[in-house]
Image (cartoon, coloured by chain):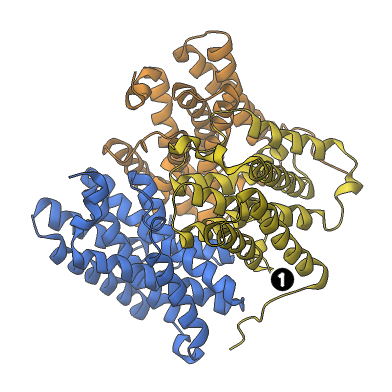
Chain colours: A yellow, B orange, C blue
Amino acid sequence: MPAAHLPEALGPILEFLDMAGIAVFALSGALLAAVKKQTLVTFLFFAVVTGVGGGTVRDLLIGAPVFWVHENQTLLICFGAALALWLLPARLWKGKTLLWLDAAGLAAYATFGAAKGLAFGLAPLPAFAMGVLTGCLGGIIRDLLAGEPSILMRPELYVTVAALSAALFVALTHYAGVPGDVAGPAAFLAGFALRAGAILRGWGLPVYSR
Amino acid sequence: MPAAHLPEALGPILEFLDMAGIAVFALSGALLAAVKKQTLVTFLFFAVVTGVGGGTVRDLLIGAPVFWVHENQTLLICFGAALALWLLPARLWKGKTLLWLDAAGLAAYATFGAAKGLAFGLAPLPAFAMGVLTGCLGGIIRDLLAGEPSILMRPELYVTVAALSAALFVALTHYAGVPGDVAGPAAFLAGFALRAGAILRGWGLPVYSR
Amino acid sequence: MPAAHLPEALGPILEFLDMAGIAVFALSGALLAAVKKQTLVTFLFFAVVTGVGGGTVRDLLIGAPVFWVHENQTLLICFGAALALWLLPARLWKGKTLLWLDAAGLAAYATFGAAKGLAFGLAPLPAFAMGVLTGCLGGIIRDLLAGEPSILMRPELYVTVAALSAALFVALTHYAGVPGDVAGPAAFLAGFALRAGAILRGWGLPVYSR
């Protein structure tokens, strides 16, 4: 099967996870633009960069064509997310909304990144790393652009969440033979649940203290 | 026509716009090194990274060979810009020089990025986005490296300028059939004029205020 | 000789330099995670991003397959470095350890980056620039992620060190015909010695002072 057709082979549920990851990261980017009192055009810019950033780096690393440059759909999703945030009442976005959107994007991108890595023939360990790196990248790029302290440095679990989703997907599909459309949602939900515990209850791993 | 020959098809005026964008971004990078009291070698480094940064990402995204790695000319332009800044009297660079150089680079790169995107077969919306993203990237990378607040976050119009140049170029060439060597200067000048209004008169769009 | 086989043609000593550069940059990334009191998973993340960051960008720029995605070895080196740092007594890492690891990574990556650029057919000036850019990138990415002031902006020589190693390698192999396995260690040692002088004695070039 030629490489260009591989993404379709990932199955509809993983495709949905990809779109959902793009949409929630785009929302999280636009939300940071709102917090920073920016214009609508900057909302759109942040939505696009945060929405497609992680996946773009993933595609460059695995040698795939960058997923959003040959169709309009992905950019329209990002533009829609930014517009929705601009138009809808601000009280919908108050409080910890940014953290929850970021959590969903993190788990979705980590899962889909590992899946696409395996689909492009990566060895299991690099496929796992691809999920972790590209899952975390959207939030990293967003925070760098806005001059915020990186979400990586927050005390609760973050990279670990991406590692759980990516490792679970690789283990289930590559080693246990579970189909991707089952392993994908399972890996996403496990990562999202872990991040939820981190946000709500401050779950963390022991930190270096020497 | 094979992809490797497409850039030549962009025409001499767009090629000139590309070189001009590289030179002014290189100057703006070297100027920030001057503000930060760096050495000549760091001047050269900042000139290269700022001068070629946006175009490098553009080429990676559209799957083109990175434009500066197979010839010496581009790097020599960047080196020349850094040397000129090092040697010439500092009063030439005082005040708002960095903003004006950045304005020219922004409009030139946004126009040329959209043009190269179309030349490599991108759909109109991604070609537009390519112009915006890669137009803004030179300044973003420069500010990140120097630890400056990002130019994106300044109150006046910035991303909007890149969006105007890129949208105008795509509209004129793709939809209205205007030749690139006419549409290119028009799109550049429109963007530069808008940024000039933003710098001189503080033109801006309404910001998010809820 | 097909491009995919070129890296092997670099010879065993340059290959060793590459692995050594990855390992010390990985250690420097994990060490910054330790300074920032992070978890083991964040140690691993920083080790990977810092260890492979510069080389990844190098491979993207020269059009080579990204070196770490089709085998497990590179990631295992990074994981081993992070684990060693987590487990071994902290007094081994106190003081200026981060600077020394970074110095070794800088000189090794600058040398190997120039070598790989030449091996992929780049012109001498871009091959030199490739060494400088990718040598400096590991430290830049590490500091950006951690929210540290960039190592580029420190007063002592830094970019100059990468420039010395890269220029020496290009001059010795491309112009003087010295074999890579001799020129590589020479270029590495010259750069490392220069950085050592910068760290120990504050060696520097004149800074811009107008």
Position of B60 compared to A32: left or right?
A: left
- The numbered mark 1 sits on a residue in which chain? A
Q: Quadrant of residue C158?
A: bottom left
Q: Position of residue A71 (x, y in %)?
A: 58, 28
Q: Answer yes or no: is residue B195 visible.
A: no
User: Circle 1 — which element?
Assistant: loop
In terms of depth relative to the viewer, which is nearer, A208 or C114? A208
Q: Quadrant of residue B85?
A: top left
In the image as oriented, which residue stretches furthest toward the front?
Answer: A177
Position of A134 compared to B17: left or right?
A: right
Residue of label 1: A156
Q: Position of residue B19 (x, y in %)?
A: 39, 30
Q: Quadrant of the N terminus of chain A?
A: top left
In terms of depth relative to the viewer, which is nearer, C118 or C95? C118
Q: State whether residue C23 is above or below residue B49.
A: below
Q: Amino acid at mark 1?
A: Glu
- Residue visible at 20% across and 69% down in the picture: C185
Q: Position of residue C35 (x, y in %)?
A: 56, 79
- Residue visible at 25% across and 64% down in the picture: C15
Position of B61 compared to C204: left or right?
A: right
Q: Quadrant of the C terminus of chain A?
A: bottom right
Q: Quadrant of residue C112?
A: bottom left
Q: State whether residue B24 is above or below residue B170.
A: below
Give neighbour class at mark 1: few <14, some 14-19, many 20+ (Cα, 10 Å).
many
Q: Answer yes or no: is residue A161 visible.
A: yes
